[in-house]
Image (cartoon, helix red, strand yellow):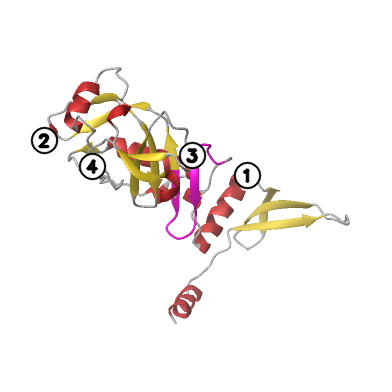
Amino acid sequence: MKSLTNLYDQLSLKWTPIFGLIIYASNEETPSHYVEAAQVGENDELINLHPLSLQESTNIGRITMAATGSKDYLMSKGFIPSNVLYLNQSGEGKVVWHTAPQRRRLLFGQELELKNGRANVPGLLWIASADKLRLFALHSANKVASNSPLYIAPFHNVSSNGAVCMGNVDIDARLSDGLEAYMTNWETAFFNSHFTADHGGGGKTKDLHTLYSELIGTDNRFPEEELRKLKQTIKDVL
């Protein structure tokens, strides 16, 4: 009944044609096709006919996906990035990818009495839906595979089960312009948030305060021997 009501509401609106497509077919046994686009003039005539451009084709695709509930923010601009391990565009959507050890700028709340700065962080496994992020660490000694063990991500605001509190950063990843931007936006949002609380992410022998006191502003590699191993592997979170 709800969908019928929505249909009546839509029919009561005034719809103005603004754009049209003309599809040509050759007279071959297996026809080839050619598509022209046109604007619609004030008197509903087709004007400015021209070959359909890539941008126009992309825009049509986005309109179609929006109408069908598809998630264009999970659509890759080309080949799916090689660091993507899992991609599900149904339901809430889900992407799993990994990043290599890298140097990132970290921000801390005043209550932690840690200075902001750049530090080396370990390889990470990112698990993101439209509005939730989970994060685990990876050991560089292990090749990234389905049976690779997971480690607690050694950061404030991250629980031992991978759940991430984004703190002062508000993100709507659904506004991302494609899969690559979606992944980058999540990574940027995480590292732009202020770390404020230790949710159990400390190392084997050093707590997070000690770890980052020794890492911030130095070229020291992240001490992977401090990573705390979980019973889970990558395949358990796909």
**221 lies left or right of 175:** left
Residue 185: name its quadrant. top left
Amino acid carrying label 4: it is: Asn
Label 4 element class: loop
Amino acid carrying label 1: it is: Leu
Residue name at image x 80 percent, y 52 percent: 32
Amino acid carrying label 3: it is: Ala
Within 10 Å of disc 4 (Cα), the crowding (few <14, some 14-19, many 20+) is: many
Where the N terminus falls, by quadrant? bottom left
Q: Which residues are magenta?
A: 80-96
- Residue holding disc 3: 145
- Residue holding disc 4: 157
Q: Is residue 214 magenta?
A: no
Of circles 1 and 4, the one toward us is 4
- Residue holding disc 2: 111
Are the two marked residues, 1 and 4, in contact with CB atoms closer than 8 angstroms? no
Mark 4 → mark 3, Cα distance in angstroms: 27 Å
Of circles 3 and 2, the one toward us is 3
Q: Which is more toward the observer, 4 or 135?
A: 135
Mark 3 → mark 2, Cα distance in angstroms: 39 Å
Mark 1 → mark 3, Cα distance in angstroms: 36 Å
